[in-house]
Amino acid sequence: MKSFGSGLNVAVAGATGGIGKALCAQLVAMPSVNRLYSLSRVQNADANSIYFDLTVESSIAAAAEAIKDSAGVLHLVVVATGVLHDGATFQPEKNWRGINPENFERAFRVNATGPALVAKYFLPLLARDRKVAFAALSARVGSISDNDLGGWYAYRASKAALSMLIRGLSIELARRSPDALCVGLHPGTVDTGLSTPFQSNVPRESLFSPDYASARLLEVLDALTAADTGGVFAWDGARIPP
């Protein structure tokens, strides 16, 4: 993360998930990171562990206010959350007969509305005078032009919505902070609970550990510049088409 400079204050939302936990472990070990705020519904003894519920706006607002009182500014915010299934009633649709309004509502609440609300309260905390970034975990299946298989309607649509949100937020953020990034990040297929039911057809070399995926995403963020803001980028740095 050399391009961000030193003395970084970082917030990771979804810090107890597979990728979120790996991101926290790697960031806290970096000499350039001053404070790491881990945001989740599970708090630990760390003073910088803050209760956070992505589906409750007042919780997001309170977390942002706590960080503002503690650090004043942030230099990196990563929203490492997402939902694809719950292992029971909520599963990706195989065809249009599986479309369910409750599942659509849940997918959009977590994958689109939640990150948008984090942006609402956390973008104002980003420093104005240096490279900073707001990043949210996205997915290649949210690309409209890349959809050759169909299905997975709620998840695809919610991730496509996230891409539009990122684009709009990036335009507004650039007016405030010319050196700021607002991007989506696709980690690839990562060995977490989200992908577990769908790993059988994934080649071993394409199934990443959370540590590997997180390290690659941080490298991508380090390499991006303000000219890349508004885009969605894969773990290998490739831009994902809208």
Image (cartoon, rainbow, N blue to C red):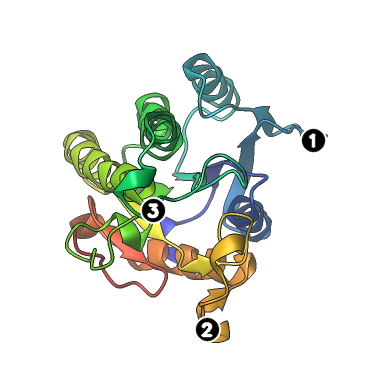
Return the disc, 2 or 3, that comes first in the chain's sequence.
3
The quarter of the picture where residue 38 lies is top right
Between label 2 and label 3, give the one nearer the viewer.
Answer: 2
Q: Secondary structure at mark 3?
A: loop
Q: In the figure, is residue 174 to the left or right of 25?
A: left
Residue 210 in percent (x, y) is at 61, 65
Q: In the figure, is residue 151 to the left or right of 52?
A: left
Between label 2 and label 1, give the one nearer the viewer.
Answer: 2
**Amino acid type assigned to the residue bearing label 3 in the image:** Ser
Residue 126 in percent (x, y) is at 39, 36
Mark 3 burial class by Cα count in 10 Å: few <14, some 14-19, many 20+: many
Residue 226 in percent (x, y) is at 23, 55
Q: Residue at x 44, y 43 (%)?
A: 75
**Amino acid type assigned to the residue bearing label 1 in the image:** Asn
Q: Secondary structure at mark 1?
A: loop
CA separation, marks 2 and 1? 36 Å
Q: Which residue is mark 3?
A: 138
Q: Which mark is residue 160?
A: none
Q: Residue at x 21, y 43 (%)?
A: 164
Report if residue 197 is visible in the image: yes
Q: In the figure, is residue 115 to the left or right of 58?
A: left
Q: Which residue is mark 1?
A: 44
